[in-house]
C-alpha cells in the first residue's frame, strides 16, 4: 500500500526560528494535506494543496505540492510557543468524492524558551 | 468546516467487553471515516462509514471486530468488540466536507481515548 515518509521525526528549536518539514511518497497523490495535533485533541487541518506545484500560505505557514505529485513540504516562519505539537502530512488519492487519507509518521515540534 | 463531536471522550474498559463510540457532525457530510491512533503513532484508517450501506474496511480490520453504523448524513458509530489490551488507542472520527465538485477536505473529531485493562 501507499506509504508516506515524513521527516524529520522530531525537531527541537528556539522560539523565533523557522521550521521546515517534508513528506515523500513512492506513489502519486492528487491532494496533500497538512494537519497539526495537540495533546488530547484530534488533528486540525492547516493547509490543503490540490495542484502540482501549488504554493499556499496560511499566516506563518507555507506549504507546497511537489511538481512530481510525490512530495510536499511545510514551512513555519518565526515559530512561537503555540506551534508546539505534532504535524502530520496526509496524501489523498481520490479525485471525485471523498477518499481515504494516508498519513505520514508525524513530526514532533518542541520549542525551547 | 464541519464541527465534529465524539462520545465518550475517554473510557477504561475490561477485556472481553465492547464499547460503542458515537460521532456527530454539525452538518450533512458526504462521507465519514474512522481512524485508530496507537500511542505515539500516526493515524491508520479503519473503515469508511457509508450511509445506507455496509462500511468499507481496510486491510487488517474486520466488521466482526469493528462494526460501524451510519444511519444518516450526520452521525456514525464505531463499536470495538471483545476488547483486549491491544485495542487501547485513540479512535478518531473524520468527515469530508465537500467544497467543490472534486475537492474534499477531511476534518477530525477530538478522539476517544480507550484503555483496556
Image: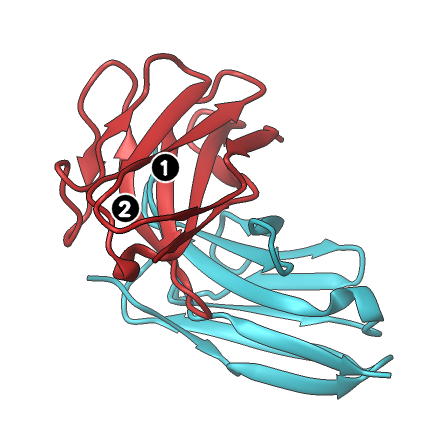
Residue A88 image point, x, y percent: 52, 63
Residue at 54% across, 41% down:
B9
Whether residue A98 is visible here, answered yes or no, is no
Disc 1: host chain = B
Quadrant into which the N terminus of chain A falls: bottom left
Q: Where is B78 relative to A60, above or below?
A: above
Q: Is residue B87 left or right of residue A56?
A: left
Disc 2: host chain = B
- Color scheme of the displayed model: by chain
Q: Where is A41 relative to A97, above or below?
A: below
Is disc 2 in the same subunit as disc 1? yes
Residue at 36% across, 57% down:
B88
Report, in whole angstroms, how far the alpha carbon at label 2 lies from the one at label 1.
Answer: 8 Å
Q: Secondary structure at mark 2?
A: strand
- Within 10 Å of disc 2 (Cα), the crowding (few <14, some 14-19, many 20+) is many
Q: Is residue B76 left or right of residue A51?
A: left
User: Splitting the image into 4 quarters, where does residue B56 fall?
Assistant: top left
User: Splitting the image into 4 quarters, where does residue A103 fall?
Assistant: bottom left
Residue A55 image point, x, y percent: 63, 59
Residue B10 image point, x, y percent: 51, 45
Question: Does the residue at mark 2 contact the one at mark 1 (Cβ under 8 Å)?
Answer: yes
Mark 2 and mark 1 lie on one chain; the one further toward the N terminus is 1
Pointer 2: what residue?
B46
Kindly indicate which chain is depicted in red in the rendered structure. Answer: B
Quadrant into which the C terminus of chain A falls: bottom right
Kindly indicate which chain is depicted in cyan in the rendered structure. Answer: A
Whether residue A96 is visible here, answered yes or no, is yes
Pointer 1: what residue?
B33
Q: Secondary structure at mark 1?
A: strand
Amino acid at each position: 500500500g501507499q506509504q508516506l515518509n515524513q521527516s524529520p521525526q522530531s525537531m527541537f528549536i528556539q522560539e523565533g526560528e523557522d521550521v521546515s518539514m517534508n513528506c515523500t511518497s513512492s506513489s502519486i497523490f492528487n491532494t496533500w494535506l497538512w494537519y497539526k495535533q495537540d495533546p488530547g485533541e484530534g488533528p486540525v487541518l492547516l493547509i490543503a494543496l490540490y495542484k502540482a506545484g501549488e504554493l499556499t500560505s496560511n499566516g506563518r505557514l507555507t506549504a507546497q505540492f511537489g511538481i512530481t505529485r510525490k512530495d510536499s513540504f511545510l514551512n513555519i516562519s518565526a515559530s512561537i510557543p503555540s506551534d508546539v505539537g505534532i504535524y502530520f502530512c496526509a496524501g489523498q488519492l481520490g479525485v471525485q468524492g471523498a477518499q481515504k487519507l494516508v498519513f505520514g509518521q508525524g513530526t514532533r515540534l518542541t520549542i525551547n524558551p | 468546516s464541519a464541527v465534529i463531536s465524539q462520545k465518550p471522550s475517554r473510557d477504561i474498559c475490561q477485556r472481553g467487553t465492547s464499547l460503542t463510540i458515537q460521532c456527530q457532525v454539525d452538518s450533512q457530510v458526504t462521507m465519514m471515516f474512522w481512524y485508530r491512533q496507537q500511542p505515539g503513532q500516526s493515524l491508520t484508517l479503519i473503515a469508511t462509514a457509508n450511509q445506507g450501506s455496509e462500511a468499507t474496511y481496510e486491510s487488517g480490520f474486520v466488521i466482526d471486530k469493528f462494526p460501524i453504523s451510519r444511519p444518516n448524513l450526520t452521525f456514525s458509530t464505531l463499536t470495538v468488540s471483545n476488547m483486549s489490551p491491544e485495542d487501547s488507542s485513540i479512535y478518531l472520527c473524520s468527515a469530508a466536507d465537500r467544497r467543490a465538485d472534486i475537492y474534499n477536505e477531511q476534518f477530525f473529531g477530538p478522539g476517544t481515548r480507550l484503555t483496556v485493562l
